[in-house]
Structure formats: C-alpha cells, structure tokens
Amino acid sequence: MREPAKRFVQRHGAWACRRLHAGGLTMEVLDWRALPAFDADLLAPSMPDDVASLVTRIRSADAVLIATPKYNFSVPGMLKNTLDWVSRAEDQPFRRKPVAILSAATGPLGGARVQYELRKILLFLDALVLTKPEIFIGRAFSKFDPQGRCTDATTRDFVTAQMTAFQQWCIETRAIKVGAGAERPVWK
C-alpha cells in the first residue's frame, strides 16, 4: 500500500536534507500549511504575518531546496500558493538565490512535469535554478524503507551528485553576487 503523499515527500525530502548536511550545509524545513490562500485583498493593507515571516526566511537563506511531489502533472496547489505570495514581496527574496529542485513520485517519471512547471515560475522570480543534474525519483515507494532510508544505490548516487552540484552552485552564485555590485561594463 502506498503511503500518503505528505509523509512520503517529507521522508524523502528529509533524506535529501541529510545528504546536504553531510556536505556541510544545514537545512530548515518549511511547513506551508500556516499560509492563507493567496488573496490580493489580504495583501492590500500589508502582507500577512505568516507570509512576511516566510519571505524573511527565504531572504536570509543562502539557498533553497524544493522537494516536492507532483499533483495532476503540475505543481501542488499549496506550493503554487506559497510561490504566489512570495512573488508579491518587495525586494524579491528569490532574486539571485540558488535553488535546487528534487521530486519524488509514485509514478515512473518521478515528478518531471512538476519540475518543468516550477522552473518557469522560478524564472519569473529571478531565482538561479540549478540545471543539472535533475533528480526525478520515480516509483519512490519502492526505493525507500519504512524508516525513510534510501535502499536504491542508483537513487543515492543521483541525489548525492545533485547535492554536491548544489553546494558548488551555492559557491559559484555567491561569487556572482559579490561581483554584481562592481561598476564595470558588460560589453567591451
């Protein structure tokens, strides 16, 4: 029997986070359930407190890893809601922020479609999305044990490669940010 999607993704996202931690990075997990449905009328007076807190957390993070399932060939509604709220923030917190995407799904494609949809949204937010390696964990229910440990060597290798690339991406994008303030012509 397949487990509920929420627990499924939490376990696999946590596994990826441990891989990040092994590389010297730390992770803070976001629970989006406290966010209200996006409503411009709520935004009119000011950003809701839970949203403002999220924006601050993203802005202060060195990088963002999005671990998500896919629903109906696309982005889960609550993730899209979260990104819609963040998109309305002044001084966009995703601007020039390194981002990696990891998806795990019960189907054979491993959430490929959600990643392509997310990349379009993150492009609008000016995020610096890691392009390769892409990680789509298909039939994920067969690759993890009940304790959340990955039992599939190929999946472990793929995720390890992505986390290593993500760590390097964070270093490279930090160098881009440092150089961005310098006054120099783009074309010679």
Image (tube, helix red, strand yellow):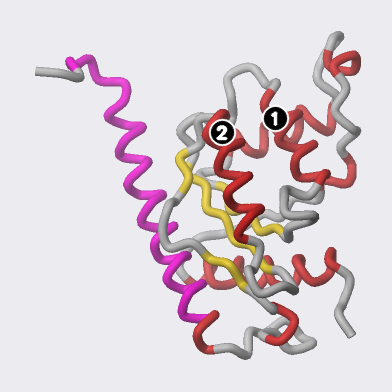
Residue 101, by quadrant, is: bottom right
Q: Residue at x 59, y 61 (%)?
A: 102
The answer to whether residue 3 is left or right of residue 70 is right
Looking at the image, which residue sits at the far top? 45
Is residue 27 found left or right of 9 in the rendered image? left
Disc 1 on helix, strand or loop? helix
Relative depth, front residue between 60 and 131: 131
Position of residue 110 relative to residue 117, above or below, is below
Residue marked by disc 1: 86
Q: Which mark is residue 7?
A: none
Q: Are marks 2 and 1 in contact (CB under 8 Å)?
A: yes
Q: Amino acid at mark 1?
A: Val
Which residue bears the numbered disc 2?
A: 94
Q: Nearer the viewer, residue 152 or 148?
A: 152
Quadrant, the N terminus: bottom right
Residue at 67% x, 26% y is 87
User: Mark 1: few, some, or many residues within 10 Å (few <14, many ≥20)?
Assistant: many
Which residues lie in the magenta part? 156-185
Q: Is residue 35 magenta?
A: no
Residue 116: give x, y in percent of width and height: 58, 49
| Residue 23 to residue 65: above or below | below
The residue positioned 84% from the left and 33% from the top of the image is 50
Q: CA distance from mark 2 to mark 1?
A: 8 Å
Q: Quadrant of the C terminus?
A: top left
In the depicted structure, whether residue 144 falls above or below residue 59:
below
